[in-house]
Image: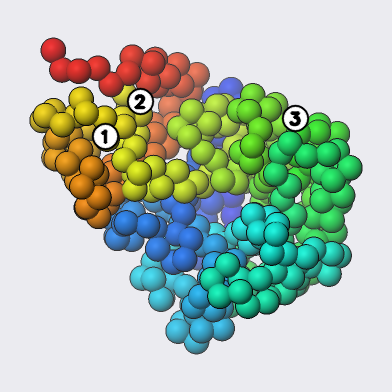
Amino acid sequence: MHEKFEFKLKATSGKARLGEISMPRGVIRTPAFMPVGTVGTVKAMYLDQVRELGADIILGNTYHLMLRPGPERVARLGGLHELIRWPHPILTDSGGFQVMSLSGLRKLDEKGVTFKSHVDGSTHHMSPERSIEIQGLLDSDIQMQLDECVALPAEPKEIERAMEMSLRWAERCRIAFGEQPGKAMFGIVQGGDIPDLRIRSAEGLKQLDLKGYAVGGLAVGEPQAVMLDMLDITLPVLPSEKPRYLMGVGTPDDILKSVALGVDMFDCVMPTRSGRHGLAFTRRGKVNIRNARHAEDMRPLDEQSNCPASRDYSRAYLHHLVRSNEALGGMLLSWNNLAYYQELMQGIRKSIEEGRFADFMAETQEMWAKGDVEAA
């Protein structure tokens, strides 16, 4: 058991980084993909399955968990790990992104944000201090600062205002977090699609000497090229000895290209959300299992996969399940998708260790480009 939070950079291949985060509840191999367990569940999955696929850490959502079952109740029940039967590391986001999506139901000022619950309309106030308090009650291992996330495109003055507020909130969160051995608080770089603001945000957060740094406010409406440009500008400013987390991203292609720029951690609802809507991710690219061409195709999604959902069930059966709105269809496709994401991360880590990440990236993209061809 590791008594403190520690990040070790083990190898590089170009800008891609192989690392390891050690914490009391376990080791996180980076680059890492964190399945999203919004309300204490990775949708349509048993957490034992999630672990078996290779996940070292999952994400929980502060906004949703504060509304139900409530942080005080979770604390009384022994914390989130105990409640959901996941003894490994958990990262909780601050709730800032969800509050952004409630623009018609919120009021934001220097003190924090007052908003109405989307569940029952009740009024709540979340300050930076309360966000950290909630994450502490949940007993999460990595806690995120409360920030203001602005959807793009947006006016430069609005982006700057939100970035400056987020910086001030980061300092308040750092004070509220204090010293918690074995745990970490990460700051969040904001600044939209404006390079100078991104740099100012990163420089300001660096002064707080946090355990890790996230890049937020991307994948919120801008093209992929803009996201990558902002990463290319921001990441060199952040301390190389600290982990870097790109929030809410993304597609397998987003992940590959972001690893190439030096990102260490990712999370996204895409694998499970896509699975529930009939979209599978495979090493041959995306497969829309709803398409009629799969109705009599007895091939599995991927005969070479170690995942039973990918290897042992025919496309014809998956097509039938999804078109019939059977819950099992979403479960099997979510299982397949999370398996593919973890297989991708494993391949990324191995290629960095071998000093051949650029080759791995090209080979993976070439396989995607071939597409999901029909059997001969």
**Residue 368 in the image: x percent, y percent?**
37, 20
Q: What residue did someone put label 2 on?
A: 285
**Which numbered disc covers residue 233?**
3
**Mark 1 residue crowding within 10 angstroms, few (<14) / some (14–19) / many (20+):** many
Q: Secondary structure at mark 1?
A: loop
Structural distance between the alpha carbons of marks 1 and 3 = 38 Å
Q: Is residue 99 visible?
A: yes
**Residue 326 in the image: x percent, y percent?**
22, 52
Residue type (three-letter) at the residue carrying disc 1: Ile
Q: Secondary structure at mark 2?
A: strand
Q: Residue furthest bottom?
A: 76
Q: Is residue 303 visible?
A: no
Horizontal side of 209 relative to 363 (left or right) equals: right
**Which numbered disc covers residue 219?**
none
Which residue lies at the image location 59% right of the left edge and 49% below the top edge?
7
Residue type (three-letter) at the residue carrying disc 2: Gly
Image quarter (top left, top right, bottom left or bottom right) of the C terminus:
top left
Q: Who is closer to the viewer here, 14 or 155?
A: 155
Q: Nearer the viewer, mark 3 or mark 2?
A: 2
Q: What residue did someone put label 1 on?
A: 289
Q: Nearer the viewer, mark 1 or mark 3?
A: 1
Residue 294 occupies quadrant: top left
Q: Are marks 1 and 3 in contact (CB under 8 Å)?
A: no
Above or below 202: residue 350:
above
Residue 354 occupies quadrant: top left
**Residue 2 in the image: x percent, y percent?**
51, 62
Above or below 98: residue 124:
below
Q: Nearer the viewer, mark 2 or mark 1?
A: 1
Structural distance between the alpha carbons of marks 3 and 2 = 29 Å
